[in-house]
Image: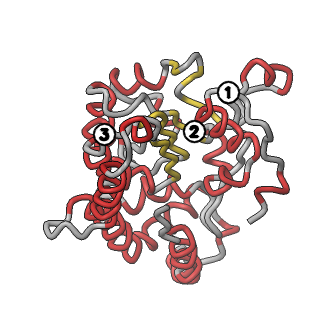
Amino acid sequence: MWETGWKEVIQNIISDHFEAADARARGGFSDFVSEARDRILELTAAVPGSPLWTEMKENAALASLRSDGLGAMQLITKCVSEAVSKLANDKAGAWELHVVAHSAGSIFLAYALEALARLGVPIRTVQLIAPAIRLDLFEQKVLPAVAGGVCPAPTVYVLSETGELDDDVGPYGKSLLYLVSRAFEDRRDTPLAGMKYWIDRASPPVLDLLSGKSNGRPNLVVSGAVAAADAPAMVGSISRSDSHGGFDNDADTMNSVLVRILNDLPQRTFDSRDLRF
């Protein structure tokens, strides 16, 4: 598990710069429409937020790419390789990998795929939850891995476009991915693989992948898109998160993750009480 705490840090940045942004607006935010308010916050938060986000992406890459071989993923794959080599062939053949990556974890995974492929342990499922990875990096790293049989087509869980706009990061009135796309990347409105808006406008290879199915289930799961009446027929493809950070607290999302790992119904499903953490 790769834990960054970056959402909390960014929330603090937004809160710390709220007054500065308010001053730049020359009045209370209530005097402005929400889009103008958010644009001011984007401009204000970009100065401290962009270097932080860049460093986090570099750390995600270096976990697999350090020249001294001491990156976290490099050490993990070394230990796993040693463990597998000591097992009897029949036991080694029973191993499999399942990857679940939330938000910035998708960037970590993109660089880790090559190292994971060398393990000789099959990657059975890849599930990306509100991935913060740029679409161009997704195309460069993930699509070739799928085409080369390194990993299966990923399941991508996203908020609807309305859900992204209804989410917030403290006083910022849109989702965290909107803030990353508009303020923290190297250009405004950078396409991200976790935003429905940009998925709908992605290149044909990305659209083909995400419009497809794996084991009879759609590769793209949009939160709230499945009506209650249709839920029994869509087991493993349901999410009801209403925020970027809410997917791992949403029973429908986590049960869909379980179903795809098991390729079957679990003996016991998550309920909301299990996910209060």
Quadrant in which the C terminus appears: bottom right
Return the residue nearer the eye: 61 or 92: 92
Label 2: few (<14), some (14–19) or many (≥20) C-alpha neighbours in 10 Å: many
Measuring from the top left, give residue 9's x and y in whole percent. Answer: 52, 76
Measuring from the top left, give residue 164's x and y in whole percent. Answer: 61, 47
**Residue type pointed to by label 2:** Tyr
Q: Residue 108 occupies which quadrant of the picture?
A: bottom left
**Residue type pointed to by label 1:** Asp
State yes or no: discs 3 and 2 in contact (Cβ < 8 Å).
no
Q: Which residue is mark 1?
A: 264
Foreground label between 3 and 1: 3
What's the distance in space between the residues labelled 3 and 1, CA to CA? 25 Å
98 left or right of 203 in image: right
Label 3: few (<14), some (14–19) or many (≥20) C-alpha neighbours in 10 Å: some
What's the distance in space between the residues labelled 2 and 1, CA to CA? 19 Å
Q: Residue at x 27, y 49 (%)?
A: 115
Q: Residue at x 29, y 25 (%)?
A: 147
Image vertical order of residue 1 relative to residue 220, above or below: below
**Residue type pointed to by label 3:** Gly
Tag 1, which secondary structure? Answer: loop
Q: Which mark is residue 120?
A: 3
120 left or right of 102 in image: left
Label 1: few (<14), some (14–19) or many (≥20) C-alpha neighbours in 10 Å: few
